[in-house]
Amino acid sequence: MLSFSRRLTLVFAGLLCGFGLLVGLVGRQVLNTQERDALQRLSHGLARHIVEHWPAVAHSTGGDTERRALDEVLGMLMVVNPAIDVYVLDAQGSVRAYLGDPQAVRQPQVDLAPVRAFLADAALPLLGTDPKHPGGGKIFSAAMFPAQPGDAVPPGYLYVVLEGQAHEQVAGHIGQQRIWQGMGLLLAVALLLTLLLGARMLHGLTRPLRQLAIRMQAFGPGADPARAGDLPEGDEVRAIARSFDLMAARIDEQLRDEARQQAIHREAMANVAHDLRTPLTALHGHLEALHGLPQLQASAEGSHHLGIALAQSNKVRRLTQQLFELARLQSGDQVVHVERFRLDELVADAVQKFSFDTGAPAVALAGPAPGPVELDGDLHLIERALTNLIDNALRHAPSDQPVRVSLERGAGQVSLVVEDHGPGLPAELRQRLASGGALRDPPMLRPGGGFGGLGLAIAQRIASLHGGSLSLRASSASGTTLCLDLPLACA
């Protein structure tokens, strides 16, 4: 199979030949029209001149003497100019006299409309009837015979066909041959030069395409770099199409493998977190029991170390629970338990629950009350997301600054806003929130070790399951302002 550039060259050559043929035909028609126009203008007064200088043409009555005189005049005119055919017409346009074989006149009736237009000085060229070739228009010259006193019938016309039979036989053959020879030579030279330039340009334009096809072919699995310059079937476009299909298939397979690996990873994390919950709960219970023993309470050092162990045990328990919840949320694409509830009441209850914790900064409602706000979704999941946001703010906020929780109602959605005055989120976490990317894909490493952002990742996933989002709102003061946007319930 020919290469893409060669096929383009062949198509270009075919179009060029067709264009050259069209130009030749149009040019020939234009040249013929111009030639006829020039000849008719030059011979415009020929018939009138004949009528004025040879009265025998106009006053023949049909006798033998007049007929011989008319034939002599017509013969003399056709000897002087063999290219013309001279006819004497009556007032109705019928051929009354013609020098030559009477059988040559195949149409004895001449259309007088072009003749009258000619005598009225209409725009040239004008084509009239050729009595020898019915149906073919020819340029002509015409003049009306002068009227004589006592004539019973109107005068006739002298009708001169300027492209007579002799002109057509000689000039037509020679002219067409020369025209076609010249046009053929011109077309051949133009085609050769244009093809050379066009082939060079097309080769240069398609070279990047060929190089891309070679690179894509060499990029495929199992490709031999030593044969990267060989294209199967010699077609760059087909090679690129095949390479693209192979690449798309590989990408689809990689995406499916990645989805399977993520599903396996989430399932493994959920299983590990689930399996750890029972021993961690038992361990925490035993630590609490040991912390309550009187003999350990009497030892300050033992009580101190046991308190640290209890705090770390509680932290591990909380992280395990968050890992289990996140893996469970990521395993589904929709909320299972959907009900309509009052979001404003849920926010008030959550804030009131945190107000009983005397060892943490205060949590207070802020902003104007939005009134009743109804939401369609999982009440427990929304409560979990809000609890995670408040808990995350409490762990980073200073003790003398309260955490502010507000509810803002907009067009078609409601925003849960949690604001603290802490040191702010890590730069990578802020970047992921600003771009709307997943907070746990890939996992974000903490500077001190371990993985961070589990609580916010759970809140983000809950918002996504409800058709909302978690974003970071710009704040003039120090600290962090997180916004959980959720769609309002339909009426």
Image (cartoon, grey):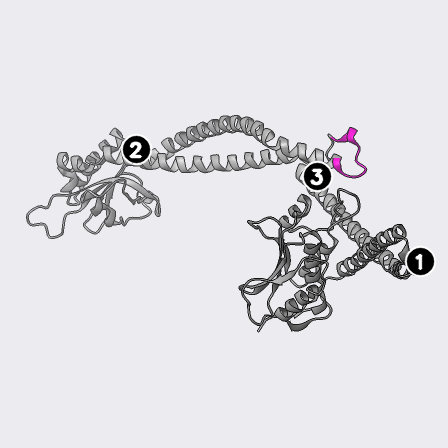
**Which residue bears the numbered disc 3?**
239
Residue type at mark 3: give it.
Ala
Along the line of sight, which residue is nearer the eye, 236 or 339?
Answer: 339
Task: Establish if 141 lies above or below 91.
Answer: above
Task: Establish if 272 lies above or below 222.
Answer: below
Determine the CA span between mark 1 and mark 3: 82 Å
Q: Residue at x 79, y 35 (%)?
A: 223
What kind of element bears circle 1? Answer: helix
Q: Nearer the viewer, mark 1 or mark 3?
A: 1
Residue 110, position as x, y percentages in the image: 27, 48
Provide the residue span drawn in magenta.
219-228
Inspect this view and state whether residue 334 appears.
Answer: no
Q: Quadrant of residue 7?
A: top right
Residue 469 is a magenta residue: no
Determine the CA span between mark 3 and mark 2: 66 Å
**Which residue bears the numbered disc 1?**
295
Residue 222 is a magenta residue: yes
